[in-house]
Image (cartoon, grey):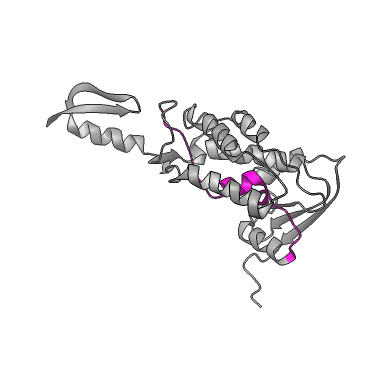
Amino acid sequence: MLGLIYIFDCKGRHKIGNMISELVIIIILIGHINSGPGTTPNINHIVIGRCYEYISLVNPSNRYKCEEIWHEFEKAVIQRTPCSVRVKDYEQMFYAAPQTPPCDKLLFWSKTRELMQSYPAVTGSFWTLEDTLVGFMFKDLIWCGQKERECGFDFHSCPEWSKCVSHPVYSLWKRASQNFAAAACGNITVLLNGSIENAFDRNSMFGSEELDNLNPRMVSHVHIIVVSNYEGPFV
């Protein structure tokens, strides 16, 4: 069966001629191999809204230009193809959102996310990466640009982290983790999962980025907590 195939991009429609329609299906399938969910819907409203929530309610002592932070973030992502957003591409965004976390309160973690979220709630005295402005704004969101540069975000599918050398989401969290660790001072706490074979994983974000960016002149003590039974006890 013959049919006309059109390529749709952000600048218009281009007819490319007669081809076998089955080929269209093959092309579509190939295009979605190793792809995950697309950019989080309404990501601009979510990010800017979280920013205003942070500076109004969470940490009102700081003042930031939320629209400027969003603009620098958007520029870093949509001006590059989905797998070519490097750590340094977010530099201007982080310049627009400088922050110095408090000394003696930073909590680092590796493969203990659920416990990490409840631990500060119980103690009430720790700061995690998610407590920073950038961490608060982008937590649990997904984003990537389209293959055609400057065509906006791709809301249909984004590449998986493992299939992408410079993944836009990974690069942002990598830079955020580096900054968070570099600003650590005084006593810090590290929460590790002792119920797995490698409680300390050199390839994790903590092992590969945060640990190497800790400043020994600023950090006076490291308190390591290894949770041997991650699922309990239930008392």
- Where 215 sits versus 58, above or below? above
> From the image, which quarter does the N terminus lie in?
top left
Was residue 126 drawn as part of the magenta stretch in this picture?
A: yes
Give the residue displayed 62% in from the left and 67% down from the top: 231
> From the image, which quarter does the C terminus lie in?
bottom right
Q: Is residue 85 left or right of residue 218?
A: left
Query: Which residues lie in the magenta part?
Result: 123-147
Quarter assignment of residue 234: bottom right
Give the residue displayed 75% in from the left and 46% down from the top: 101
Q: Main secondary structure of the magenta part?
A: loop
Q: Is residue 49 left or right of residue 5?
A: right
Q: Position of residue 29 (x, y in %)?
A: 31, 38
Give the residue displayed 45% in from the left and 42% down from the top: 39
Judge by depth and name the residue closer to the eye, 190 or 57.
57
Q: Position of residue 150 (x, y in %)?
A: 44, 26
The answer to whether residue 103 of the structure is visible from this angle is: yes
